Amino acid sequence: MSEKQHPIRIIGVGHQFRGDDAVGLIVAQRLRAVCPPGVTIVEAQTDGAALMETWAEADEVIIIDAVQSGARPGTLHRFNAHQQPMPVHCFGCSTHGFNVAEAIELARTLDRLPPRLIVYGIEGATFEIGQAVSPAVLASAEELAERLADELIGR
Amino acid sequence: MKSKTIKVDYLARVEGEGSLMIKLKGDQVVDVKLKIFEPPRFFEAFLRGRHYSEAPDITARICGICPIAYQMSAVHAMEHACGVVIDGPLRALRRLIYCGEWIESHTLHIYMLHAPDFLGYADVMQMAKDYPDHVRRGLQLKKIGNEIVRLIGGREIHPINVRVGGFYRVPTKHDLAPLAEQLKWAREAALETVRWTAQFPFPEFDADYEFVALRHPDEYPLNQGRLVSNKGLDVAVEEFDQHFVEHHVAYSNALHSTLKERGAYLVGPLARYNINFDKLSPIAQQAAREAGLGPSCRNPFRSIIVRSVETLYACDEALRLIEAYQMPDQPAVAIEPRAATGYGCTEAPRGILYHRYRLDDQGTILDAKIVPPTSQNQKMIEQDLWRLVPELMSFSDEKITWQCEQAIRNYDPCISCATHFLKLHIERE
C-alpha cells in the first residue's frame, strides 16, 4: 500500500488575534493553497478535547502550534509524539480546554493517538490580543510551510 | 502575631485569569479578595451604534464555552424590544440548541475541570490513567452536546445560524434523526455520571444561600421565566435593574452584582435545582433522589451531582424535543425595529445571563447592558471562602490552596465572561 492511500491531516492550531499564537493557522493557510489530494488541512482553535476528534481516523497527523519555551523567537521545535512525551508547559495555557500537548498526553493515555503524529512548535514572542505576528515568527512559519509542502508534494 | 504568605501563580482548570488573596491574622480570616485582572473587553461599549441584528453574533464572542447563552439572551431582548414573541417549533429549536450547550459545558466542567479535585488528581490527564473509561465517556458525552450545537447552530464554537426572530436555516425532521440515536446513549451515560459523582467524598458545607433562577410555569428553565429566589424575590425580567445592582470593586476588573435588599446571591445549577426541582423530568428527579439529593441541596460541593442531574435532564429534554419536532414553515419571523428598550434573561450553564438593549426606531443599539453569571456569583465565592478557610487552618498551605481552588471550581467562574483568574496569595499575619 502506498503512502497516499493513508489520509494525512495537517492541523494548524491557534488564535487569529493573539499575536504569535496565530502562527499555526498561518502555516495551515499557506499549505491549503498547495496541498496535494489526500491531505486535509484544518485550522483549529485551542480546544484540546476537540483536537482528538479532529485527528480521528487519520493515519498521519502533523500539528503546528506556537510554543513558549524561552528559546529565540522563530525557533522551530519538532516532536515525534510516539517517541517522546510532550513538553506540556511549552504549549501555553488554554484554560477551559487543554493545550495541544495536554490533548496529546490525554490521547496517549486513552489509546487514541494516530499511528503517526509529528508536532511542530514555533517559538512565539508576543501573545497579546490585537498584536501582529512577530517578523521572526512569520519568517519561520513561511519556511516551515515551504518545507512541509516540498515533503508532501515529493511523496 | 504570626505572619505568612502563600502564593500560587495561577489557578488551573478555570476560565480566564485572576488571583485570590486571603489574609490571615492568627486563626482569623481578615480579608478575602477574588481578583480578576483579565483586561476589560468593552463589549457593551462596542455594541453601541451597531444594528440590533448583530447583537447575537457579537455577544456570542464573549464566551467560547457558552455562546448559545449569549445568543439566546440577545435574541430574546431584541424580540422583546420589537414586540415579537417566538413560539412553536422555533422556540423548541432554541430550547434544543440550548440543551446541546448545557450537555457540552456541564460535561466539560464535571469530567475535565472538577472531578479530578474529588478523586485527588492534579488534572484530567492524571485522572485518565486510572479512570480511562470514565474520561472516554465524558469526552463522548461532550461530543454529543457539541453535535447538537453544530447541527442547529452551523458550527460548534460561536455558532452562526441564530438570528433575531429565529434561525437562518432550520433542520428537517430527518436531519435531527441521527441525534436521537446518539442522545439515547447520552441519556444512559448521563445517568451513569450522576451515579459516579454521587460517590465522591463531600465536605459538610451547607449554607443558607439566596438562590436566584428563572422559573417558568411549565418547564425547567432555559430561555424564559420570572426571576425567582427562595427568599421572596419574584419579578419579571424587565424588573432586573430595580432589584440587582452592579458594584465596581477596586481590586477587580469584573463588577460585583448584589441584590439591593439583601446582598450576595447565588446563580447556576444549584440555584436552578433548588428553585425548580419540581420541573425536572421524572428520570432526572429519580436519579437525583437515588444520588441522595432531596428537592433542596445547599452544599456547593455537591453542585457536581446537580450538574450531572441537569446534564441528564438536558439529554432527556433534547430527546423529547427531537421526537416532537415539526419543521417550521419559516426559519424566522419578520422583525420590525422600533424605538424601545428590550430585556432578556436566560439560564446559561453557570446561571442567569441578563441583557438589556435600548434601540432607536431604525434598530440601532443606543445602549447595552450585559450581566454574566460570574459577576453575580463572585461575591458568593468570596463568602464561601470566608467560611471555608477557618475550618482549614490546621492544614498545610498546600492543602488550604487545594481546597480553596476546589471551592472556586464549584462555580467554575468564567473569568473572561465576567470581565468585562487565578493566582492565590495567602497572607498570614
Image (spheres, rainbow, N blue to C red):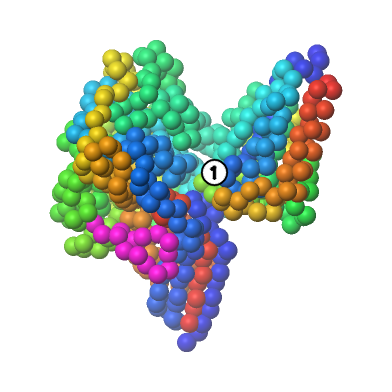
Which chain does the numbered disc 1 sit on?
A
Nearest to the observer: residue B80 or residue B271: B80
Q: Which residue is mark 1?
A: A97
Q: Quadrant of residue B127?
A: top right
- In the rendered image, residue B425, in percent from the top left (x then y), is placed at 51, 70
Looking at the image, is A79 positioned above or below residue B375?
above
Q: Residue at x 51, y 82 (%)?
A: B3
Task: Tally the numbered discs.
Answer: 1
- In the rendered image, residue B4, in percent from the top left (x then y), is placed at 53, 78
Residue A108 in view in this figure = no
* Magenta span contains residue B251: yes
Nearest to the observer: residue B45 or residue A114: B45
Q: Residue at x 48, y 82 (%)?
A: B429
Q: Residue at x 77, y 55 (%)?
A: A71
Crowd band around label 1 with a 10 angstrom C-alpha radius: few (<14), some (14–19), many (20+): many
Q: Amino acid at mark 1?
A: Gly
* Magenta span contains residue B260: no
Looking at the image, is A137 positioned above or below residue B391?
above
Badge 1 element: loop
Residue farthest front in this picture: B362
**Chain part drawn in magenta:** B244-257
- In the rendered image, residue B277, in percent from the top left (x then y), is placed at 24, 41
In the drawing, does residue B285 fall left or right of residue B407? Answer: left
Q: Residue at x 18, y 55 (%)?
A: B242
- In the rendered image, residue B381, in percent from the top left (x then y), is placed at 37, 60
Looking at the image, is B115 positioned above or below residue B87?
below
In the drawing, does residue B315 fall left or right of residue B426? Answer: left
